[in-house]
Image (cartoon, rainbow, N blue to C red):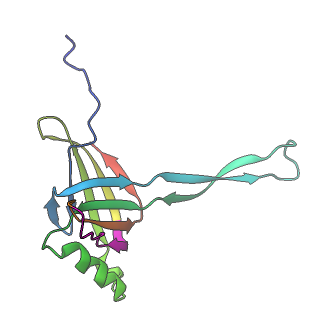
């Protein structure tokens, strides 16, 4: 067998480092899409078609979901933003993707992330599910690293 085989990583083994603390308690992480706009441009001496130039790059928000516990770290972070303390509360968030053995194989480093939405979850007197809190983060971009 070829020892250089590279199997794809699974989507269920991951952990986050957020607020300087390694966290593995998230049940779902969604990284929004990155898009770069194409801008049409034409000068009067150009052929009769538009050229494509690069425009603004936009980064979709990151959505974090986890079962609610007695920890208030995420809601405290969101409350600081609501209080107007955005600049001092922007954080680097690192999302680690692990292989079957639990070794870190890929990571996404998110720059200047801050909460734009916090939802404590739904309560239901007839339910039996875990309460899921959701935190949505705006950011200034991310890089994928190995």
Residue located at (37% from left, 67% from top): 137
From the image, which quarter does the N terminus lie in? top left
Task: Write down the region rendered in magenta.
Answer: 112-127
Residue located at (30% from left, 61% from top): 64
Q: Which of 131 and 100 is in front in this view?
A: 131
Q: Position of residue 136 (x, y in %)?
A: 36, 66
Describe residue 21's horizontal placement relative to residue 117 as left or right.
Answer: left
Q: Does the magenta stretch include residue 126?
A: yes
Residue located at (36% from left, 85% from top): 82
From the image, which quarter does the C terminus lie in? top left
**Residue at far front of view:** 126
Residue located at (24% from left, 73% from top): 74
Q: Position of residue 141 (x, y in %)?
A: 41, 59
* Up-down relation of residue 68 to residue 88 (above or below): above
Q: Residue 118, located in which quarter of the rendered image? A: bottom left
Describe residue 98's horizontal placement relative to residue 114 as left or right.
Answer: left
Q: Position of residue 75 (x, y in %)?
A: 25, 77
């Amino acid at each position: 067998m070829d020892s250089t085989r590279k199997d794809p990583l699974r989507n269920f083994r991951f952990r986050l480092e957020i607020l300087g603390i390694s966290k593995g308690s998230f049940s779902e992480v969604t990284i929004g899409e990155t898009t770069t706009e194409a801008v049409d441009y034409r000068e009067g001496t150009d052929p009769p078609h538009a050229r494509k130039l690069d425009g603004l790059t936009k980064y979709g928000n990151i959505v974090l979901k986890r079962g609610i516990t007695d920890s208030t770290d995420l809601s405290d972070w969101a409350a600081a933003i609501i209080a107007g303390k955005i600049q001092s509360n922007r954080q680097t968030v690192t999302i680690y993707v692990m292989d079957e053995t639990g070794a870190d194989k890929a990571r996404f480093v998110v720059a200047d992330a801050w909460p734009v939405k916090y939802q404590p979850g739904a309560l239901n007197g007839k339910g039996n599910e875990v309460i899921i809190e959701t935190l949505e983060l705006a950011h200034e971009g991310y890089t994928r690293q190995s």
